[in-house]
Image (cartoon, helix red, strand yellow):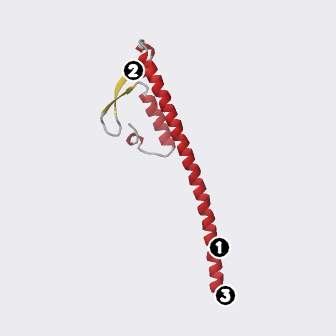
Amino acid sequence: MSQTEFELARLQAEIEQLREENEELKAEIDELRREADLDACHAAGLTAQIRALIAEGDACPNTAAHPLLVRRDYVNSMTGETIRKTGAFPIYREAFDAEARELGFIDVDSLRA
């Protein structure tokens, strides 16, 4: 086998190895997309559930029984604008910030309202 043939065979083997790695990476990306899609489904379900709970609390004449549903003014961390949210909003912020920090985000205030 000549040097050129040897080099060609080596390059073909390398190309095949890269193709296999590429297929593995494509499968991994597909799995990550699936997980992200499922996370989006969970977020949609939780959002609907939260909206229903808020609506039920709003319909209750005894607002003192639902202190987390009382609307308050907060400052949007990204824009500095005043936003009106339920009293549960700090719980959202705390959970968001903790998760963002755990995932390696640094300036979490700039990532959420």
Which residue sits at x=46%, y=45%? 105
Sort mark 1 into few (<14), some (14-19) or many (20+) by Cα contacts within 10 Å. Answer: few
Find numbered disc 1 in the image and state the secondary structure of the residue it sits on. helix
Q: Secondary structure at mark 3?
A: loop
Indicate left or right for 21 with 67 as reference: right
Mark 3: amino acid: Ser
Residue 20 position in % (x across, y down): 63, 64
Percent of width and height locating residue 101: 48, 42
* Quadrant including the C terminus: top left
Instruction: Compare residues 78 and 57 and report the one nearer the observer.
Output: 57
| Label 2 SS | loop
User: How far apart are the alpha carbons under marks 3 and 1?
Assistant: 16 Å
Query: Which numbered circle lies on residue 13?
Result: 1
Whether tag 3 and tag 1 are in contact, CB under 8 A, the answer is no
Q: Residue furthest left?
A: 81
Residue at the location (58% across, 58% down)?
Answer: 25
Q: How many marks?
A: 3
Q: Residues within 10 Å of mark 2 (few under 14, many from 20)?
A: some
Q: Which residue is mark 2?
A: 70
Q: Which residue is mark 3?
A: 2
Measured in 3D between alpha carbons, the distance from the residue under mark 3 to the one under mark 2, in whole angstroms, is 82 Å
Disc on the earlier residue, 3 or 1: 3
Earlier residue among tags 1 and 2: 1
